[in-house]
Image (cartoon, rainbow, N blue to C red):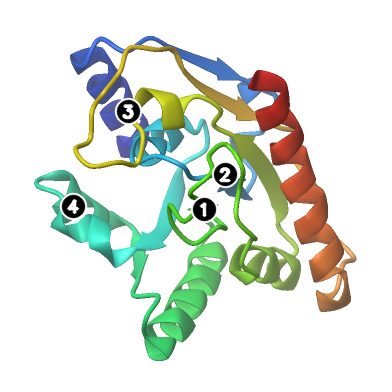
Amino acid sequence: MLNRVWAYFFFTLIAMPFSLEGKKRLDRNRQYIFVANHFSYLDIASMGFNPVNAVFVGKNDMESVPLFGFMYKKLHITVNRGSLSSRVNTLKRSMQAIDDGKSLVIFPEGGILTHQAPHMTRFKDGAFRVAIEKQIAIVPVTIPNNWIILPDQNPLLLRWGVMKVVFHEPIETKGMTLDNLTKLKEDIFNTIDKKLKHES
């Protein structure tokens, strides 16, 4: 809930209009793993509009952001992708969060890595491995406009535009095994990518 309060406050503060699509597809009493494209630092705030209470799993460099970084470190799961032990620990903590009844938000590209937005980079396995092992539904999420509103460039310049988040139909993983991981990952990549191309 704190994520939603913060998201509404943040976008109201900067007078940025927003559009949320597909929220009614989701059952607030269920657990999900939300996976979204990641082209802009604005994506993290945007995923705060998630209607289901969730823990973010993300890079530890967000901890250095004033005020927000402290909240992020205390409430969410951070990872140093340059450290194997950190990546393993993050996977274990993500599994435990699911066991504790929480949902997760993961950017499966592993950070803002593309140099050709809105074209995504290859997805990493973590989110899909957790979903299959815990038999949790995955919700693909498309964030189509943030790379235009706040491009990943130096200096960071905020432009006016409508921030939009599209929550797609949940994809069930019940009955799947790790043999299905590659196909699941490809299907979700294609769902997000199709909407990105349509919006572009």
Q: Which mark is residue 7?
A: 3
**Which of disc 4 and disc 2 is earlier in sequence?**
2
* Residue named by callout 1: 107
16 w.r.t. 120: above or below: above
Estimate how packed mark 4 is, as few (under 14), some (14 to 19) or many (20 or more) residues with alpha carbons within 10 Å: some
Residue at the spot of label 4? 69
Label 3 Cα neighbours within 10 Å, binned few <14 / some 14-19 / many ≥20: some
- At label 1, the amino acid type is Phe
Q: Earlier in the sequence, mark 2 or mark 3?
A: 3
182, 112: nearer the viewer: 112
Residue indicated by mark 2: 36
Determine the CA span between mark 1 and mark 3: 17 Å
Query: Hey, what amino acid is under mark 3?
Result: Ala
Mark 1 vs 4, N-terminal side: 4
Binning the other alpha carbons within 10 Å of mark 2 as few (below 14), some (14 to 19) or many (20 upward) gives: many
Numbered label attached to residue 175: none
State if disc 4 and disc 1 touch (CB < 8 Å): no
> From this viewpoint, is residue 172 visible?
no
Q: Looking at the image, do the residues carrying marks 2 and 1 touch, with CB atoms under 8 Å apart? A: yes
* Horizontal and vertical percent position of residue 69: 18, 52
Secondary structure of residue under mark 2? strand
Does dot 3 land on a helix, a strand or a loop? Answer: helix
The picture places residue 88, in percent across and down from the top left corner, at 48, 85
